[in-house]
Image (tube, rainbow, N blue to C red):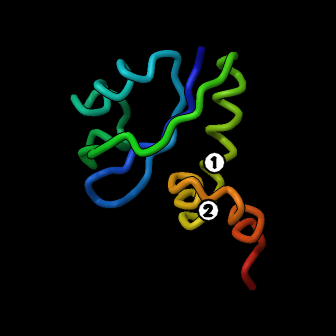
Amino acid sequence: MAWMYIIECADGSYYIGSTKNIELRFSQHQEGTGSKYTSVRSPLKLVYGEEYERVIDAFTREKQVQGWRRAKREALINGDPELLPALAKKIF
């Protein structure tokens, strides 16, 4: 199994990643060894996760969500999938 996950950092930013072991990876982030991004932002909590059969699927989803605006990420975190299509539209 594999996971795509979102961590909320102390500065309010979100870190999106993927892993085969979500508990181990989150503890690595908490210890400051998970990634350069989270090591300087003190991750607070794991706010979202999706489980996948294959690692490539979790990684693909990670890259997709990384490209989203904050509002769209928050709709996903808050369990509001009906808001995602409207939030995908470009603002001019």
- For disc 2, the marked residue is 72
Q: Residues within 10 Å of mark 2 (few under 14, many from 20)?
A: many
Q: Secondary structure at mark 1?
A: helix
Q: Is residue 13 above or below residue 6?
A: below
Quarter of the image for residue 29 reads: top left
Question: Where's residue 64, x and y in %?
Answer: 69, 45
Reply above or below: 75 against 31: below
Q: Position of residue 34 (x, y in %)?
A: 35, 29
Above or below, comparing residue 19 to residue 79 in the picture? above
Q: Which residue is mark 1?
A: 65
The residue depicted at 51 percent of the width and 22 percent of the height is 19
**The residue tagged with tag 2: helix, strand or loop?**
helix
25 vs 76, left or right, is left
CA separation, marks 1 and 2? 9 Å
User: Residue 81: where, in percent of width, then height?
Assistant: 67, 56
In which quadrant of the rendered image does the N terminus lie? top right
Task: Give neighbour class at mark 1: few <14, some 14-19, many 20+ (Cα, 10 Å).
Answer: some
Residue at position x 54%, y 29% in the image: 18
